[in-house]
Amino acid sequence: MAEFDIPSHLIELERAAYVEEQAGALTLATASAVQAAYRQHAAATEGLSRLALEMATKRAVRHPEG
């Protein structure tokens, strides 16, 4: 997978969604906000796949390198 910078606001949104998900309380509003942010960032960044961005962000949030 290609390396690219993940904006901090996406990390924060994904982290909030992951916390809610782990608590069994993920809301539609949170999930929608995260997906909208992925779509907007990918659309504004030429050649960046929304799916690649989402996968990289989830990996960074769920499996941070220590």
Image (cartoon, grey):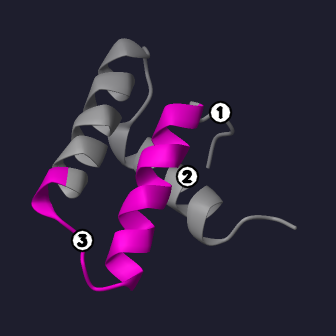
Q: Earlier in the sequence, mark 3 or mark 1?
A: 1
Q: Residue at x 43, y 21 (%)?
A: 47
| Residue in the foreground of this view, choosing between 20 and 31 | 20
Disc sitting over residue 56 in the figure? 2
- For marks 3 and 2, give the CA distance: 20 Å
- Seen as rendered, the residue at the extreme right is 66
> Does the magenta portion include 3?
no
| 40 relative position to 62: left or right | left
Q: Which residue is mark 3?
A: 26
Start-end of magenta stretch: 8-29
Marks 2 & 1, CB-CB < 8 Å contact: yes
User: Residue 65: x percent and y percent?
Assistant: 81, 65
Name the element at disc 3: loop
Q: Residue at x 42, y 58 (%)?
A: 16
Instruction: Note whether 30 is above or below 18 in the view shown.
Output: above
Name the element at disc 2: helix
Q: Residues within 10 Å of mark 1 (few under 14, many from 20)?
A: few
- For marks 2 and 1, give the CA distance: 9 Å
Name the element at disc 1: loop
Instruction: Note whether 4 is above or below 12 in the view shown.
Output: above
